Image (cartoon, rainbow, N blue to C red):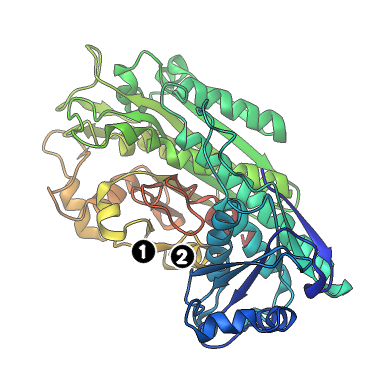
Amino acid sequence: MVAGSVLKARLEEAKTPLLVVFTHEDGDSAEFRRIDKALKGQLSELKKNKEFEGKAMTLSLLRTPSSPFKRVLLVGLGKKKELSLEMLRRGAGVAVKAAREQAPEIAIPVSHDRGGLKRLDAVAQAIAEGVILGGYRFLKYKTQDVESLKQLKSFTLLVEEKAQAKPAQRGLEKGAILSDSVNYARDLVNTPAADMSPAALEEESRRLAKRHNLKLTVFDAAELKRRGMGAILSVGKGSAVLPRMIILEYRRPGAKKHLVLCGKGVCYDSGGYNIKTTMLELMKDDMGGAAALLGTLDALATMKTKAHVTVILGAVENLISGSAYKTGDVVKASNGKTIEVLNTDAEGRVVLADCLSHASAIKDADMILDIATLTGAAKVALGTVGGVLTPNDRLAKALIEAGEETGDRAWRLPLWEEHKEDIKSDIADMKNIGYPMTAGASAGAVFLQEFVAKPELWAHIDIGGAVYDDRERPYLPKGATGWGVRLLTRFVELQ
């Protein structure tokens, strides 16, 4: 974990191995002008020669051995009028990746020219998130050359006025908590399935519950059978590690609503007898919904958020064996509805059928959300953006706005009555896939809706494309993204 601090100091006198200076392509920032003056025009000379123009996410490094700051890293944020908190996160993310190769400590001014961004705490939070999220590396299994990987050890947020110190510290602390929780979720998803089985996910939930004094309940296979949860049991039949339902409850005085969040925890997905032919090495990420919810609980509890949240995780492995469920099977969920399994690789919705049925039986629940790596169709439609599907316009708007604010961007996909036609079965209440190559994300969501008692108080979030990325992005490394932790934490805060 990278340690952050706030320091009151004059910009030109900041003693640091590396000073990060943000600026723009359509005008110099205040700190750019001041450092340029201190360095007798070196920065403006770069712009004059078009060696650095301030375009978004571009960098330039200068060595300044005679100054208190030994290096200056210029970071372009693009056009000043387009500056946003997300652009600051991205700028801080690219900065930390470049800076860690040069110095173990950096300093970043937060109190100067920030265009239309008026709240200093929000600016400090965005920068802290960019630094900590951008500096993430998953090194758990590295045994060689680890020492050669240069890591940032600490960063300092610089302010010049005493009145700015408290809001900067507040923003830093919140940004650090959220980022650490996102990185926790990333670690869970990046962990190979051999070490993140349903049993291991249960143990991780127990550790989290103990750390934050959460109420924990686990339904083992025998209890699932007793409760008639044939859907989740069917998916897990092929694995030597039996399925389980993990329920954690966070409750703090002052909460106005009880939110129930369901997460798909398929710890490995072979596709079953409809075996996958590609990306099998990535199928450890199919518990990304469960990981996002554990990260959200970690953030809420650490911040002591006034909230009442119950998390329900369906933990299971979808494997092939002599006992595995088969295409053509009919299984029954705990709400009594029957499902014709026409594709064993559409297992996540079958698991969530029992999770959502159990959530709907919670009498004081005010809202139910589920988050799942449900469909490849969502990735095709949205890329690395989360898909929101709900009949509730206000709920969709609130989730999307929370995503825009936090950087976990989401977009609404349709959930129409005609989609129900696509999941009608000839021999059961419904089938677990829709019409081939047609509105797959919507078909998955309308299936889930059948297991929610009050659909008007429910939303489904499909993170089939958002959970994992094989591209390096400003504050996202290759691999697990931790998508959903920041969005859901913010959404809960606003309830």
Residue 246 appears left or right of 338: right
Q: Quadrant of the C terminus?
A: bottom right
User: Residue flagged by tag 1: what amino acid is it?
Assistant: Arg
The answer for how far apart the CA atoms under marks 2 and 1 are is 8 Å
Residue 208 on image: x %, y %: 64, 32
Residue 200 on image: x %, y %: 51, 22
Q: Look at the image and tell me whether residue 24 can be seen.
A: no
Q: Which structural element holds mark 2?
A: helix
- Seen in the picture, residue 350 relative to 364 is either above or below; the reply is above
Residue 249 appears left or right of 55: right
Badge 2: residue crowd in 10 Å (few <14, some 14–19, many ≥20): many
Q: Which residue is mark 1?
A: 412
Residue 326 on image: x %, y %: 18, 23
Nearer to us in this view, 209 or 226 = 209
Q: Look at the image and tell me whether residue 133 can be seen.
A: yes
- Seen in the picture, residue 197 relative to 19 is either above or below; the reply is above
Number of dots carrying numbers: 2
Residue 13 on image: x %, y %: 82, 71
Nearer to us in this view, 481 or 153 = 153
Q: Which structural element holds mark 1?
A: strand
- Residue 400: which disc? 2
Q: Residue furthest front?
A: 66
User: Residue flagged by tag 2: what amino acid is it?
Assistant: Ile
**Which numbered disc, 2 or 1, marks the residue that appears first in the sequence?**
2
Residue 280 appears left or right of 200: left
Looking at the image, do the residues carrying marks 2 and 1 touch, with CB atoms under 8 Å apart? yes
- Seen in the picture, residue 259 relative to 391 is either above or below; the reply is above
**Residue at the image position 32 percent from the left and 57 percent from the top:** 383
- Seen in the picture, residue 306 relative to 24 is either above or below; the reply is above
Residue 316 quadrant: top left
Badge 1: residue crowd in 10 Å (few <14, some 14–19, many ≥20): some
Q: Quadrant of the N terminus?
A: top right
